[in-house]
Image: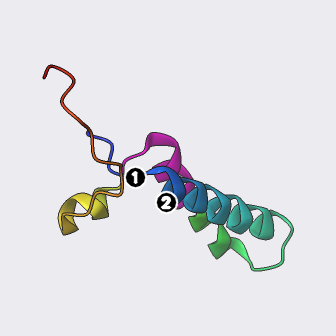
Amino acid sequence: MKANVGGIDRILRGLVGLALIAAAALGAIGPWGYVGIVPLATALFRFCPAYTLLGIDSCPVRRDETA
């Protein structure tokens, strides 16, 4: 799995995931809020399967260090 989730994308996914899980745990939005596990997991692993299917990569451009 090649990382395809970059810095700001990763932070936003983590925050949204934690917010959804917290809201579900507090009973504010019901059990569907536990879907926040998905963006939280993609932030932790820095890999999003949907990005792979869509050809998206929000990671910064990597330079070849051998030159």
**CA distance for labels 2 and 1:** 6 Å
**In the picture shown, does residue 23 fall above or below 48?**
below
**In the picture shown, does residue 60 fall above or below 55?**
above
Q: Residue at x 21, y 23 (%)?
A: 65
What secondary structure is found at the residue carrying circle 1? loop
Image quadrant for the N terminus?
top left
Say which quarter of the image contains residue 52: bottom left
Amino acid type of disc 1?
Val
Q: Residue at x 35, y 50 (%)?
A: 59
Q: Residue furthest right?
A: 26
Say which quarter of the image contains residue 22: bottom right
Q: Which residues are magenta?
A: 37-47
The residue tagged 2 is: 9
Q: Residue at x 35, y 48 (%)?
A: 60
Measured as percent of width and height from the top left, residue 54 is found at 21, 69
Asked if residue 41 lies left or right of residue 6, the reply is: right
Q: Residue at x 32, y 50 (%)?
A: 4
Amino acid type of disc 2?
Asp
Give yes or no for residue 6 being in the magenta stretch.
no
Q: Which mark is residue 5?
A: 1
Number of numbered labels in the structure image: 2
Q: Residue furthest bottom?
A: 29
